[in-house]
Image (cartoon, grey):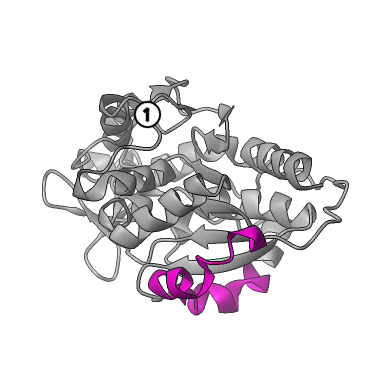
Amino acid sequence: MLKKIFGLAAKVEFDGSFSPSKLALKLATSAKTDYEDIDYKKYKGKKHKILVIFTEEKNMTMENGKSFSTGNHPVESLLPMMHLEKAGFDFEIATITGKPVVFEMWAMPHNDTNVISFFNKYKTQFKNPKKLENFIENSFDRPNEYAAIFIPGGHGAMLGIPNDKNVGKVLNWAHHNELFTISICHGPSSFLATKIHNQKFIYEGYKMAVFPKSVDKMTPLIGYLPGQMPWHLSERLNELGAILVNKKADKTVCLDRKLITGASPLASNDLGKLAANSLLKEFN
């Protein structure tokens, strides 16, 4: 009862999962983003594409057995894409099996007309993404047509993607062909897929910004998560030899060789700018 009075009670969704409490939404989301509509010096060379790997899974089971209603965070997904599109790059949207992309709709900035317009523009592709296996079959022999791989954040990125062999294949392919890999917040959970079948972790020794364990452990206190996380991303990456550059869920972004990462939803705009400028520098 007290949790409801103080806005700390998580909201129960139609399927029994929990989305963040009123207080958590007030503290951690915003109806409008800090997106900067930048007039980039457009990419003028041969058109290159960016493969965006989204999650198709919605519910994360917490330590206490409760389900968190998740997916990809819309701000972490859309703002970097908006910058990359403004810079002149195209997208191919994919999920592991080709099922529709799942977003954390409770985090959608509904008063941000730029974001909503962009979301609506790609809605058909979000509903009908490519199957990742088909991308491998049809595009692996044409790496020169691609500039980068982008894996957006949201806790949903930790579901299925880190254990999928095809995600590992795509990331290794991008790494081998010196394409950029872009990710944010919990999206770097995808990097764990590169070590499936005891392969070498290709990002050992890389500096990167990711969502910190310390913040994930605190968020249940305000009803953002309905329980403690089943595992912690920053902890796993640190154990594998990644060099984490942030301790807070802030605007930190990081470029190390061809790896571009951001710490949290707050870093979405800056990640987009860094990615757009880095790709333009490389391909113009």
| Above or below, 98 relative to 270 | below
Residue 98: name its quadrant. Answer: bottom left
Residue nearest the observer in this picture, 227 or 149? 149
Residue nearest the observer in this picture, 190 or 219? 190
In percent of the image, x 78 and y 54: which residue is there? Answer: 86
Q: Where is residue 18 in the image (x, y as percent from the top left)?
A: 27, 56
The magenta stretch is 119-145
Residue 20 in view: no
Total numbered badges shown on the rendered structure: 1
| Above or below, 271 relative to 171 | above
Q: Is residue 51 left or right of residue 231?
A: right
- Helix, strand or loop at disc 1? loop
Q: Position of residue 39 (x, y in %)?
A: 87, 47
Residue to which mark 1 is pinned:
204
Magenta span: predominant SS is helix
Residue 143: name its quadrant. Answer: bottom right
In percent of the image, x 57 and y 31: which residue is there? Answer: 257
Q: Where is residue 194 in the image (x, y as percent from the top left)?
A: 33, 46
Q: What residue type is labelled 1?
A: Glu
Q: In which quarter of the image is the N terminus?
A: top left
| Above or below, 97 relative to 256 | below
Q: Is residue 144 left or right of residue 194?
A: right
Q: Is residue 276 magenta?
A: no
